[in-house]
Image (cartoon, helix red, strand yellow):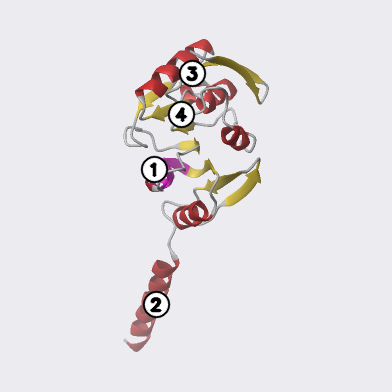
Amino acid sequence: MPEFTVEIKGKTMLFTTNDKVFSPSGPDRGTCAMLSCVEFLPEDKVLDLGCGYGIVGILAAKLTSPAQVTMCDISEDALTLARKNAAANDVSENIQILKSDGLAAVPDSDYTKILSNPPYHTDFSVAKNFIEQGFRHLASGGMFYMVTKRRDWYKNKLISVFGGVQIIEKDGYYIFIAQKRSARPKNRTTAAKTQRLSKKLARKKRKS
């Protein structure tokens, strides 16, 4: 099986891969671009969503603590490698590595950072699930990071769910950064209906 060593954010890591997982010969440029836009804080609770063989989650564990990191993927091949790589990089103790279809098997809903490099060469169903469920699994004020080579659909979807998004273009990729500011942002239609209802109630009170 292929092996490579990589240094990211001052941390040197060793990874074993195989040809059944994404980017087996080295770290994907999109993932590296996304990680360059993230500052991991000691207190962060991190979810590596669609972890593959584990670059994002293992780096996060080294910069925070293994007990504060969850990695999930639907692929057994990816999870086997992620567990092996976590052990090889001395972060296997207390780290959570889960088999999950999206976030279906992820129990916590208080992550401060969720990071994902979704499969963007297919339809948008996986990314749609990641974004919608990612919002629900973030703590208030938590940050959602996603990297793709497409822009418009992701921009519109993230705005519709989070209420806003920052977009950074780097190395041919778009890094999307969105913050959870409330339990669920109101869309404009809902807000307008609420405003009209409030005005009607106010008129009724004046008449009574």
> What residue is disc 4 on?
51
* Residue matched to label 1: 126
Specify few, some or many for label 2: CA neighbours under 10 Å numbering under 14, 14-19, or 20 or more. few
Left or right position of 76 against 177:
left
Q: Is residue 94 visible?
A: no
Q: CA distance from mark 2 to mark 4?
A: 45 Å
- Determine the CA span between mark 2 and mark 1: 36 Å
Q: What amino acid is at disc 4?
A: Cys
Q: Earlier in the sequence, mark 3 or mark 1?
A: 3
Q: Mark 2 near mark 4, Cβ–Cβ under 8 Å?
A: no
Point out the stretch of residues depicted in magenta: 126-139
Q: Amino acid at mark 1?
A: Val
Residue 129: say if magenta.
yes
Figure quadrant of residue 43: top right
Residue 17 shows which numbered tag?
3
Amino acid type, mark 2: Arg
Earlier residue among tags 3 and 2: 3
In this rendered view, identify the residue nearer to me: 173 or 99: 173
Image quadrant where residue 95 sits: top left
Out of 104 and 175, give the one closest to the viewer. 175
Neighbourhood count class around disc 3 (C-alpha, 10 Å): few under 14, some 14–19, many 20 upward: many
Per the rendering, the mark at residue 196 is 2
Q: Nearer the viewer, mark 3 or mark 1?
A: 3
Looking at the image, tell me whether mark 2 or mark 4 is earlier in sequence order: 4
Q: Nearer the viewer, mark 2 or mark 1?
A: 1
- Please report whichever mark, 1 or 4, sits nearer to the chain's N-terminal start: 4
Q: Are marks 3 and 2 in contact (CB under 8 Å)?
A: no
Is residue 111 part of the magenta span, yes or no? no
